[in-house]
Image: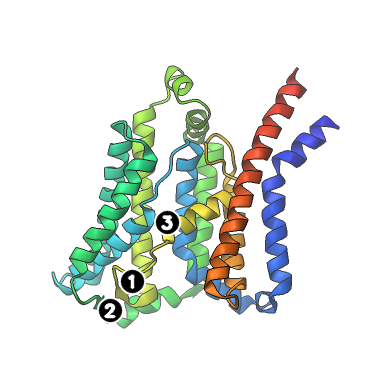
């Protein structure tokens, strides 16, 4: 009986997110058609990618508040290289991905140097957003080649390209976190950093690699933003980073690190996207208030159930 109770407590965050998702789908008839889900995938692709990328970082007990700014910065770099430098669009995209990677390495270097992740990435969040505003100038780059923009609307075997991208990144993240030595080190670092060091985990290199990967995926999101808006604007997606973090928290990842599952993040992505879209008819002030209240409640429940599950596991072992 105690074992069953432990399982139920362990999966409470998933059950909570699933109930919220089911309630939204039943209350909003539009979700019962496939076309609406396709639109949802295109609209929330950047948030989904960043949420999956943030998952290993948050499992270590870290955080990256700059992922949204990195994405916008990368999109502006693409626009500047194409419009101002006159580079082919393929080279401009490569430059945007490189800009994202360098931004991630900058974040990782600060964290490895001993700056708290919250402080480091909060500072770089404003830094990269400011660089994007400076680089874009008075007029945003726009009117990209039609074939470049049309790429975002493509499908493969009837599945929209954004959903395929999310699925591929989910599989890659799931395998890395739950079936490789990288994942074992991530969980060890999140559980106890000092013990992980004594166990031989290359803490500095692991952190640097995770933040660099996050920056590279931010560059990918910057590419998607250019295709989505057909423009490289520095004033878009101001809360993309917070949205991605909300998806991770909704999926049951502990904000203190050491607990959670990549599958929960995917469920959190779908739930948050459906929740925000389903409340589209509500006034924006009340919508933000209600969404924030739900996320706070979910975070509190996740932390409480995680501690409860830990106590139950200790009891079962004894």
Q: Looking at this view, name the residue that lies furthest to the left.
A: 85
Image coordinates of residue 156 in percent, x first then y, are 51, 71
| Nearer the observer, 229 or 174 | 229
If you read the primary sequence from the N terminus, does the residue marked by circle 2 or circle 1 appear first?
2
Residue at x 52% of width, y 36% of height: 257
Q: Which mark is residue 69?
A: none
Q: Is residue 219 visible?
A: no
**Which of 73/156 is in front?**
73
C-beta proximity under 8 Å, tags 2 and 1: yes
| Badge 2 element | loop
Q: 315 or 153: which is nearer to us?
A: 315
Q: Which residue is mark 3?
A: 241
Q: Residues within 10 Å of mark 2 (few under 14, many from 20)?
A: some
Q: CA distance from mark 2 to mark 3?
A: 26 Å
What crowding class fits label 3: few (fewer than 14 Cα within 10 Å), some (14-19), or many (20 or more)?
many
How far from the left and from the top, in percent, is residue 115? Answer: 32, 35
Element under label 3? helix
The quarter of the displayed image where residue 62 is located: top left
Residue 253 visible? The answer is: yes
**Pick the front one: 301 or 230:** 301
Q: Earlier in the sequence, mark 3 or mark 1?
A: 1
Q: What number is the disc on residue 144?
A: 2
Q: Position of residue 9 (x, y in %)?
A: 74, 39
Q: CA distance from mark 3 to mark 1?
A: 17 Å
Left or right of 316: which side holds 191? left
Q: Quadrant of residue 76?
A: bottom left
Quarter of the N terminus within the rendering: top right
Residue 226: mark in rendering: 1
Which tag, 2 or 3, sits closer to the chain's start? 2
Left or right of residue 259: residue 16: right
Could you tell me which residue is drawn at 70 percent across and 39 percent down? 10
């Amino acid at each position: 009986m105690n074992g069953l109770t432990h399982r139920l407590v362990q999966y409470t965050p998933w059950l909570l997110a699933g109930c919220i998702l089911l309630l939204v789908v039943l209350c909003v008839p539009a979700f019962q058609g496939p076309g609406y889900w396709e639109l949802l995938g295109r609209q929330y692709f950047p948030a989904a990618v960043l949420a999956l990328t943030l998952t290993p970082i948050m499992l270590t007990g870290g955080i990256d508040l700059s992922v949204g700014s990195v994405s916008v910065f990368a999109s502006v770099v693409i626009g500047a290289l194409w419009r101002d430098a006159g580079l082919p669009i393929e080279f401009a995209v490569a430059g945007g991905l490189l800009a994202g990677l360098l931004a991630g390495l900058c974040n990782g270097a600060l964290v490895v140097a001993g700056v708290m992740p919250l402080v480091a990435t909060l500072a770089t969040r404003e830094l990269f957003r400011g660089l994007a505003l400076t680089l874009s100038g008075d007029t945003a780059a726009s009117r990209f080649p039609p074939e470049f923009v049309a790429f975002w609307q493509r499908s493969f075997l009837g599945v929209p390209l954004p959903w395929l991208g999310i699925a591929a990144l989910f599989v890659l993240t799931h395998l890395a976190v739950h079936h490789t030595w990288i994942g074992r080190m991530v969980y060890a670092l999140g559980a106890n950093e000092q013990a992980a060091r004594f166990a031989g985990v290359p803490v500095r290199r692991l952190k640097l690699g995770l933040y660099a990967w996050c920056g590279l995926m931010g560059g990918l999101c910057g590419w998607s933003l250019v295709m989505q808006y057909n423009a490289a604007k520095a004033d878009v997606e101001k809360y993309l980073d917070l949205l991605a973090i909300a998806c991770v928290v909704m999926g049951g990842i502990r904000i203190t690190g050491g607990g959670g599952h990549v599958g929960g993040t995917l469920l959190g992505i779908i739930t948050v996207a459906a929740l925000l879209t389903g409340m589209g008819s509500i006034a924006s002030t009340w919508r933000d208030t209600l969404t924030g209240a739900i996320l706070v409640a979910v975070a509190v429940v996740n932390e409480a159930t995680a501690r409860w599950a830990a106590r139950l596991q200790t009891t079962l072992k004894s």
